[in-house]
Image (spheres, rainbow, N blue to C red):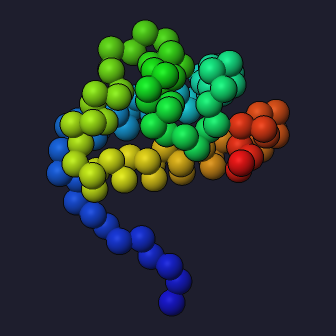
Amino acid sequence: MGFEQATIKIEKQQEFARLQAAVEQAFLPEKVERFLKLLNRKGIRVREFDKVLAARALEGAAGGSDVNALPLYQTLPVSDQAQMREFYLSKLEGIDVALRHKFKKMYQYY
C-alpha cells in the first residue's frame, strides 16, 4: 500500500481559491522566471513561503494582481494555511528542471 495524502476540507474556500489562483498565476510558464528573478533580487529562498508573501512576490509576478496575498493568507485557519503552503511547494517542484538549475542557489537548503 502506497502513501496517500489525507484529504482535509478547506474551511474558507473562497479565500483559499483566490490565493490559490495567485500562486497559479505566478507559476504560469510565461511568468515563473519573472517570479524567480524577483525572489532572487530580494534574497528570498523559494521554500520560504511566509517571506514570499511578505515581499508581495506573488503580486509582483502576476503583474498587477488585485489580490493582496499576505492578509488573505492570514485570514485562513491554520489547516488551510498548511494546505496552501503544500500547494505552493508542489508548484515549486513542478518548475522546469532547466529553470530550477538556473536558480539552484535559491532551491538549496541552508
* Residue sitting farthest toward the front: 110
Q: Is residue 25 visible?
A: no
Left/right of residue 75 with respect to residue 48 in the rendered view: left
Q: How many marks?
A: 0
Residue 48 at x, y = what percent? 55, 40
Image vertical order of residue 49 relative to residue 39, above or below: below
Residue 27 at x, y = what percent? 55, 32
Left/right of residue 29 with respect to residue 99 in the rendered view: left
Left/right of residue 59 with respect to residue 30 in the rendered view: left
Q: Residue at x 63, y 49 (%)?
A: 93
Residue 95 at x, y = what percent? 66, 41
Left/right of residue 50 with respect to residue 83 in the rendered view: right
Quarter of image, res 76: top left
Residue 97 at x, y = what percent? 77, 44
Image vertical order of residue 79 relative to residue 15, above or below: below
Quarter of image, res 35: top right
Q: Is residue 2 visible?
A: yes
> In the image shown, does 10 or 44 lie closer to the viewer?
44
> In the image shown, does 48 or 28 lie closer to the viewer?
48
